[in-house]
Image (cartoon, coloured by chain):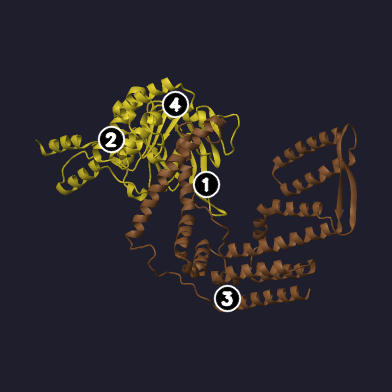
């Protein structure tokens, strides 16, 4: 491992890259609040298109934003189905009796096996998962044969559909907003921004510089420590402790053989780092200058005004509606 | 041949889309018996990557490596027990800190053999043999590996691999960080092991004196390519080693300087200082 990318930052140019991280953080939080104030699907759709225009203006690669959503797809699906099943308001749209019988349970077992086999191929995993979930309902509905364990009703209401779409759009907007932030801001800028924003907390005795330093050192050392871990794994593998092979009983010992050197090396590194910092006159808690000073520019003012306008508009809509 | 490289290339994944070519189209054969092989080359020339292919820690991005009859390709083959290959080819890493973890030296040396289902009693015996082999005495077995000096740690880590009794021993810079005396002791140790057991020993090193004095064969890496595979004698008879970021052994450069300065008729290719002195005495007629 020569280079490990931490976070999602991709280097580039554009509106959002020119901004001060502080403005970005505050704007994203404010816009999120604004999104939560919106109360109907048409309003959200407008917000969604504004969001899309924003990404287009800022030259954000849409592919990367979509890829950022992938890990959250389970959450999206869960909220979607949760709303459909448990929201019992509005007009009744669909009402079916589902049969849990010997045949349908067997069918589901078979269906699960087919699904796992297909998932092995590795493509279209999400589509497959959706098909699997749909398939379960089809099987419960249309296989009422054999000994019946129990039956249950499956009903979909108008409000359920509406709410599920509403929640999904809201989540998608919020995820894309935060992805825009992480795509265009270096982790170090992000921590520097947070540090600067948290500075007023000094009054209650929290020193934001320390936190920022801790975060930036941790981020800096993740690739280094990971690299060390791979080296230790290789060294132990050449003594017959291959992590890819071996039984569970052996694994415990293998993990110990990885963890002990990891800790020793990490402590050694932190001592060295502390020495290196002190020999360059670093004193914890003392004020220090920076190479990169944060500065607000015209873009920040523009985006700030836009954000406040958006928040004001949503509040007005909330009060009227 | 015990290990056979066929057009092996390896790329480290790097960044999001780029790859770093560590070794490039390497073909090479290593016998299981009787050779002392040095791998030399500047930092980043792919020496360690090459070594890690020898016991299937890395799988080639293209090409194949035969290790004692198993063919290693890019994809993991479920029929091959990669773990087992490592008993045949023992690889000692440069830094002992990466492998020591037990509370006593004995337990740490026993870790390897016991991974290969050798009983604790037999493993203890192997540990005892190995610690003597690396030139430490048995009192070390009860000590904590983390309280040892750098050189001692290094010896213990080598003992940890020797206890596996591999057919081929690969050592990544075994003499780095040792004092001059420790260096020659370590090399004497390897030649002794090689003489006793007739194992092939492969050493990655930057020390040309050691290469010239102890090794039978030298493999020169440069920017991921294998550019020389010959005897040290032939290598050091070449004129332009500096282009490959290699040095001449001390004896050769000193004798060459003396020869040029005093226009003496001497054979500059002497393997150690004693031989160089004898040659000098002969030349000045004493």
Classify mark 3: residues with Cα within 10 Å, few (<14), some (14-19) or many (20+).
many
Q: Are marks 3 and 4 in contact (CB under 8 Å)?
A: no
Have a look at marks 3 and 2 and say if they share a chain: no
Tag in front: 4 or 1: 4
Q: Residue at x 27, y 33 (%)?
A: B185
Q: Say whether residue A321 is left or right of residue A68.
A: right
Q: Say whether residue A289 is left or right of residue A98.
A: left
Using the image as rendered, state which of residue B188 and residue A62 is in the foreground. Answer: A62
Residue B122 coordinates in the image, percent (x, y): 42, 20
Q: Distance from label 1 to label 3 (Cα)?
A: 43 Å
Mark 2 secondary-structure assignment? helix
Tag in front: 1 or 3: 3
As drawn, A296 above or below A91: below
Have a look at marks 2 and 4 and say if they share a chain: yes
Q: Which residue is mark 1?
A: B11
Q: Say whether residue A88 is left or right of residue A53.
A: right
Tag in front: 2 or 1: 1
Q: Which residue is mark 2?
A: B213
Q: Residue at x 70, y 60 (%)?
A: A171
Mark 4 secondary-structure assignment? helix
Q: Is residue A255 visible?
A: yes
Between discs 2 and 1, the one toward the N terminus:
1
Q: Which residue is mark 4?
A: B113
Furthest residue to the left?
B286
Between discs 2 and 4, the one toward the N terminus:
4
Q: Which residue is mark 3?
A: A300
Mark 1 secondary-structure assignment? strand
Q: Distance from label 2 to label 4 (Cα)?
A: 33 Å
Using the image as rendered, state which of residue B19 and residue A26 is in the foreground. Answer: A26
Asked where in the image residue B235 lies, by quadrant, the reply is: top left
Tag in front: 3 or 4: 3
Query: Can you tell which chain is drawn yellow?
Result: B
């Amino acid at each position: 491992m020569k280079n490990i990318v931490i976070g999602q930052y991709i280097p580039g140019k554009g509106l959002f890259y020119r901004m001060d991280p502080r403005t970005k953080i505050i704007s994203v939080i404010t816009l999120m609040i604004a999104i939560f104030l919106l109360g109907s699907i048409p309003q959200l759709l407008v917000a969604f298109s504004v969001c899309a225009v924003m990404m287009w203006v800022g030259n954000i690669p849409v592919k990367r934003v979509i890829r950022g959503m992938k890990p959250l797809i389970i959450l999206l699906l869960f909220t979607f189905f949760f709303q459909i099943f448990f929201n019992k308001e509005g007009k009744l749209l669909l009402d079916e009796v589902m049969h849990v019988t010997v045949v349908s349970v067997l069918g589901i077992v078979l269906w699960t096996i087919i699904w796992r086999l297909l998932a092995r191929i590795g493509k279209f995993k999400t589509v497959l998962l959706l098909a699997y979930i749909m398939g379960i309902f089809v099987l419960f509905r249309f296989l009422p044969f054999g000994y019946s364990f129990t039956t249950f009703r499956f009903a979909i209401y108008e409000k359920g559909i509406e709410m599920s779409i509403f929640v999904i759009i809201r989540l998608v907007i919020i995820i894309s907003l935060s992805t825009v932030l992480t795509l265009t801001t270096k982790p170090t800028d992000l921590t520097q921004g947070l540090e600067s924003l948290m500075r007023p907390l000094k009054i209650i005795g929290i020193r934001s510089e320390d936190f920022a330093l801790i975060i930036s050192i941790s981020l800096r050392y993740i690739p280094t420590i990971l690299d060390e871990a791979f080296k230790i794994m290789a060294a132990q593998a050449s003594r017959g402790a291959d992590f890819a092979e071996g039984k569970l009983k052996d694994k415990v010992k293998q993990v110990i053989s990885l963890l002990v050197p990891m800790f020793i090396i990490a402590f050694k590194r932190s001592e060295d780092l502390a020495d290196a910092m002190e020999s360059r006159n670093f004193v914890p808690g003392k004020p220090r200058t920076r190479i990169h000073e944060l500065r607000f520019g015209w873009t920040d003012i523009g985006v700030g005004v836009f954000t406040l306008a958006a928040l004001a508009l949503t509040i007005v809509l909330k009060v009227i509606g | 041949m015990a290990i056979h490289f066929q057009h092996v290339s390896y790329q480290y994944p790097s960044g999001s889309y780029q790859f770093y070519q560590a070794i490039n189209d390497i073909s090479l054969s290593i016998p299981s018996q009787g050779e002392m092989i040095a791998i030399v080359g500047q930092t980043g020339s792919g020496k360690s990557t090459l070594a890690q292919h020898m016991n299937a820690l890395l799988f080639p991005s293209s090409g194949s490596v035969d290790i004692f009859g198993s063919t290693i390709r890019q994809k993991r083959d479920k029929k091959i027990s990669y773990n087992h290959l490592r008993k045949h080819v023992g690889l000692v890493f440069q830094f002992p800190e990466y492998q020591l973890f037990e509370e006593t030296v004995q337990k740490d040396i026993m870790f390897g053999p016991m991974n290969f289902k050798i009983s604790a009693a037999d493993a203890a015996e192997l540990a005892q043999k190995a610690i003597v082999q690396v030139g430490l005495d048995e009192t070390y077995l009860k000590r904590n590996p983390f309280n040892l000096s750098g050189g001692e740690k290094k010896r213990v880590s080598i003992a940890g691999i020797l206890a596996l009794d591999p057919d081929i021993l690969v050592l990544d810079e075994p003499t780095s960080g040792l004092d001059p005396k420790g260096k020659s002791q370590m090399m004497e140790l390897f030649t002794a092991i090689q003489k006793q057991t007739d194992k092939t020993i492969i050493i990655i090193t930057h020390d040309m004196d050691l290469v010239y004095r102890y090794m039978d064969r030298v493999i020169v890496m440069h920017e991921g390519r294998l550019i020389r595979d010959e005897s040290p004698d032939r290598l050091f008879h070449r004129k332009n080693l500096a282009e490959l970021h290699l040095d001449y052994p001390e004896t050769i450069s000193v004798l060459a300087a003396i020869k040029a300065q005093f226009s003496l008729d001497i054979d500059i290719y002497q393997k150690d200082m004693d031989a160089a002195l004898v040659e000098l005495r002969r030349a000045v007629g004493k």
